[in-house]
Amino acid sequence: MVYIVGEKGLSFLHASDGKDRAEAPVDADTLNKAGIPHDRAGNFYTEHDEFTIWKVDRTGKKIWSYSRPEGQTGVIGFGLISDRQGNVIFTDTGGSIFSLDSNGKERFIVLRNDEGLVFTRIWTDPDGVLYASADGMGILAIAPKDK
């Protein structure tokens, strides 16, 4: 099964014939294994363009959008992931890190604004701790207040 989030929402293509299988599972474990960022309520996060992130439902209908903050210079949407709480986290080409809650509200932004192209790797653990690594930065950990 191939999982794709696009303009038409979430599609499940069978590997043998390429046909959409609407009945394919959409449970959180399956989506996590497929690497599809989601809110744990049946909605998905996707890069709309180089400056905008969208949250969409299964059919591709936009629920909300988030655009790059004014003054930011990098292209956003790199490394788009979600955590077990349904938050979305992503980076930009300047090495900055963004996190939004499932309602599209900013949780935090770590500004780096590097003028060169910086690929920041991000991942989360089961407790909601975000880890990030990039050239010249080492490893950064951001934990919820109660952790």
Image (cartoon, rainbow, N blue to C red):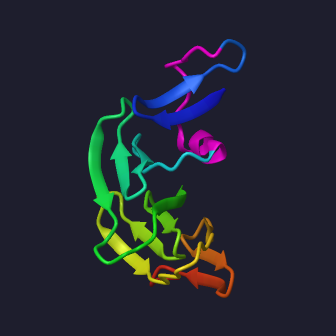
Asked if residue 35 lies left or right of residue 86, the reply is right
Q: Height in image: 26 above or below 122?
A: above
Given residues 126 and 37, the one toward you in this image is 37
Q: Residue furthest right?
A: 16
Q: Height in image: 33 above or below 87?
A: above
Confirm whether the magenta stretch covers residue 32: yes
Residues drawn in magenta: 18-34
Q: Height in image: 88 above or below 10?
A: below
Kindly indicate the quadrant of the structure image that contains residue 95: bottom right
Given residues 144 and 133, the one toward you in this image is 133
Name which residue lies at 45% across and 63% down. Answer: 76
Can the viewer see residue 84 in this picture?
no
Confirm whether the magenta stretch covers residue 93: no
Figure disc tally: 0
Kindly indicate the quadrant of the structure image that contains residue 1: top right
Q: Height in image: 80 above or below 63?
A: below
Can the viewer see residue 135 in this picture?
yes
Name which residue lies at 35% across and 42% down. Answer: 56
Given residues 50 and 129, the one toward you in this image is 50
Asked if residue 10 lies left or right of residue 132, the reply is left
Asked if residue 69 lies left or right of residue 31, the reply is left
Kindly indicate the quadrant of the structure image that contains residue 29: top right
Name which residue lies at 39% across and 42% down. Answer: 43
- Coordinates of residue 70 in the picture (x, y in percent): 28, 74
- Coordinates of residue 12 in the picture (x, y in percent): 56, 25
- Coordinates of residue 102 in the picture (x, y in percent): 35, 57
- Coordinates of residue 96 in the picture (x, y in percent): 49, 76
